[in-house]
Amino acid sequence: MPAEEQETLSDTLKRQVLAKLEQLGRKAWQQQWIDFLAIPQQLRSSVRQPITPLEQREYVLRYLLLRALLDQQASADGARLLAKRLYEEFSNQLLTEPWEISLIKILEVYHKVNQKVKESDGRPIFRVGLLGAIKPISIFGYRFLAFTGFIKFLEENKQLIYNLILRKAKQPRDAHRYLSTHPILEIGWVGRDPKACRMYVDWLAYLMTEVWHEPVRYTMKDTLMLVNGHVAKVFARTGLLSKVIYEKRRPYIVQAQQLRRSIEQLIQQTDLVPFYVDFGTYVLAQTYCAEKEPKCSVCPLALECKKYKKWTAYEQSAK
C-alpha cells in the first residue's frame, strides 16, 4: 500500500472545511433522510411522528437493520430498492416472523429486483469482490439469514431493539459494540469494524434524538464516523490529512480503512457532529468530487481545497 506525505491545510482552514462539510451534511440529511433510508410508505407515518406506539417504532428499527445489512458492498440504489420491495411484499411478517416466509418467495423478490438493477445499472445488486466463486445471491442469502436469526432471537427472548440497545446504551459506540459482535448478527456484517453497523447505529441515534426526542443519554455529537471511500477521498484531496495511503493495484484509490483512525481523531478535536460531517462528505463526493473529472470550479470547498487529484497525476504518468 503506497503511502504519501502531503502538505496539509492550516488548522484554521481545516476547521472551515469540516464546518462546511457538517453544514452541507446536516442540510442534505434533513431534506433527504426519509428517501435515503428507503422507508416504505406503510412505515412513514411511524417514523415521522414524535409519538407513535412502541411496536410501530420497533418495526422501523427492524426494517432499518435489514436495510443496513443489505447495503454492504452493494449498489446503493439496488440495496434500497430490495429492502423496500421485501417489506412491500411481506409487510410486518418480514419484521416479526421472517422464518415463516417461503424461501422461494424471498428469492423471487430478490431475482426481480436484481434483474431490474442489472438492466438500469449494468451490474447486479451485490459485487462478489475478490472471492469470485461466491455468487451475488449467496451474499444476499447469508445477510438475510443473519437478519432472520436475530429477529428470532428477539422474539424468543421477548426483546425489542428499542429497549435492548437504545434504552441501555450510554453511547452509540456501546450499541455498535453489541450489534457488531452479536453471535448471530455478526454473520451478516462485513469486516472487523463493519461500516454498515456504524451507519445503522447512527440512524438509530438520529431517530431517537432528532425525530422521536427520547430522553437518551447521548446526542448527535456522539455519533460515529463511517469513513468509506468517499470520505477518505475528500479528506485526502482537500489536504485535511498529512499522510494518505493508496491501493497498490489502483494507486489513485485511497485506502479508507487505513485512514479511519486519523480521520476520527481529526473530528474528535472539534465540536462538530461526526455523522453530519460524514454525510456532507458523501454528498460532496457524489455531487462535485468525482474520481476522474471533479467539478472543482463550482465546489463549495473550492477556496480552501488543495485539490490533490491523484487520478489526474496517475493518468498523466501512465501516458
Image (cartoon, rainbow, N blue to C red):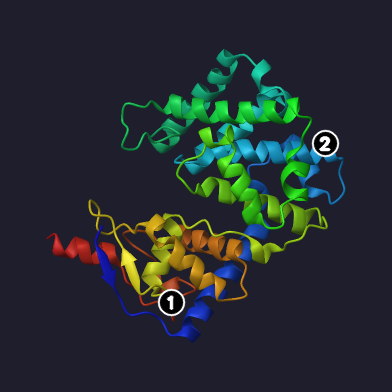
Q: Is residue 165 visible?
A: yes
| Element type where label 2 sits in the image | helix
Of mark 1 and mark 2, the one earlier in the sequence is 2
Residue indicated by mark 1: 302
At horizontal 28% and vertical 55% (from top left) the residue drawn is 247
Describe residue 235's horizontal placement relative to residue 161 as left or right. left
Q: Which mark is residue 240?
A: none
Q: CA distance from mark 1 to mark 2?
A: 47 Å
The residue closer to the viewer here, 311 or 212, is: 212
Pinpoint residue 309: horizontal percent, then vertical percent: 31, 68
At horizontal 65% and vertical 19% (from top left) the residue drawn is 99
Q: Is residue 32 visible?
A: no
At horizontal 60% and vertical 61% (from top left) the residue drawn is 275
Q: Which mark is residue 55?
A: 2
The residue closer to the viewer here, 262 or 58, is: 262
At horizontal 55% and vertical 76% (from top left) the residue drawn is 269
Quadrant, the N terminus: bottom left
The image shows residue 128, relative to residue 32, as above or below, that is above
Pinpoint residue 18: horizontal percent, then vertical percent: 53, 74
Quadrant of the image occupied by residue 242: bottom left
